[in-house]
Amino acid sequence: MIGSFRLTGLCSFLLLTGERPDIVSSFSSRQPLSISSRGNNANDADAGATSTSLFGVRSTVRRARDSLLSRERTDADLKDGIAFFYDRSSKLWEDVWGEHMHHGYYVPEDRTDHIQAQIDLIDEVLKWAGVEEKGDKAPKSVVDVGCGIGGSSRHIARKYDGCTAKGITLSPYQAGRGNELAKEQGLEERASFQVADALNMPFDKNSFDLVWSLESGEHMPDKTKFVNELMRVVAPGGRIIIVTWCHRDLEKGEPSLWKKEEKLLAKINRAYYLPRWCSVDDYVQLLEKEGAVDIKREDWSYIIAPFWKAVIKSSLNFKSVVGLMKSGFSTIRGAYAMLLMLKGFDAGLIKFGLITCTKKEE
């Protein structure tokens, strides 16, 4: 009984902290430095190890406290955490859901062909944004900002004649897997993926006719810099499409979200390595300041609402549970947070926002 309690406690602790088991074991297995060995040069290495051990304990305790209090992470912690989270969870997602790591398009709402619904979402967003399929205005170069394992990039490259796609992600696993799939699908000359920061993209200005960001904006700690970068790399006359989780727009005269809304978002942030949220209206204002034109926005929350229930249902089968256990505790915590996402959608707090615009012709 006691052993069972301890195991459950350890699992809960790891779930809260998001620590990797190998990190925890690295300090728990070390022996404390004995009093008699102090000052002995032969034991300097042990002393250093103990110092590191104590630092690890303090760091882990701090993470546990921050998780319990749903405190915001630093930008550096977010960047490292995002890479680690997706390195560990992407294979499981692909095994269960395939190459598209985003919501589906549920029209009609009772459709059950979930993978096709994800593909349809890409096509319907492109159609909604007014991207032409043929002719001189059809995109020839696209950057996928926050590309996952490249499902959207490869689909867009296939959709438009002669189009090439570049994808960026913080996850080395995702970039590598994206390139593997491009080769397997005969698209290695038209789609490529690399590790890069969306807030400092390794591309020249005016590089792409289409800048595509599907469910990655929510990870950006500096939304102003994010929008600046999107506007920098898009070519004059080119189009930007942002599809992202947002919180609801504030009502006129409303200074902020309600306290209970902020509390729910803070819990989700800890699980998914997210910074503070913004609204679709915030994005529109940022784009206007950057000189974007033809700005258009829409709320598709009702269109993607069935998706989370489908994901939760899919996680209950044996294959998914085994995969979840193998993926690590940060992935398990992310799975739990799906329930919080669903709660936010149902309450009208979390919105699935679409924003598109173009860059002025020079």
Image: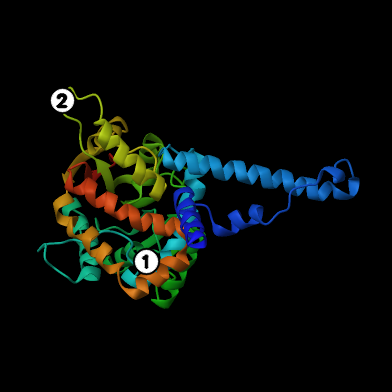
Instruction: Out of 164 and 221, give the one closest to the viewer.
Output: 221
Q: Residues within 10 Å of mark 2 (few under 14, many from 20)?
A: few
Q: Which residue is mark 2?
A: 252
Q: Is residue 57 visible?
A: yes
Q: Secondary structure at mark 2?
A: loop
User: Which residue is pictured at 21% across the width and 41% down the height?
Assistant: 349
The location of residue 303, given as percent across then percent down, is 15, 55
Residue 256 vs residue 332: left or right? left
Furthest-front residue in this view: 1
Amino acid type, residue under disc 2 in the picture: Lys
Q: Which residue is mark 1?
A: 93
Instruction: Out of 174 and 165, give the one closest to the viewer.
Output: 174
Residue 2 vs residue 191: left or right? right
Q: Is residue 287 visible?
A: no
| Residue 21 sits in quarter | bottom right
Q: Is residue 125 above or below residue 205?
A: below
The location of residue 178, given as percent across then percent down, is 43, 66
The location of residue 81, given as percent across then percent down, is 48, 49
Furthest-right residue in this view: 41
Residue 17 vs residue 357: left or right? right
User: Which residue is pictured at 33% across the width and 52% down the height?
Assistant: 337
User: Which residue is pictured at 20% across the width and 48% down the height?
Assistant: 345
Instruction: Out of 267 and 125, give the one closest to the viewer.
Output: 267
Q: Which mark is residue 129?
A: none
Q: Residues within 10 Å of mark 1 (few under 14, many from 20)?
A: some
Amino acid type, residue under disc 1 in the picture: Trp
* Disc 1 + disc 2, Cβ < 8 Å: no
The alpha-carbon separation of the residues under discs 1 and 2 comes to: 40 Å
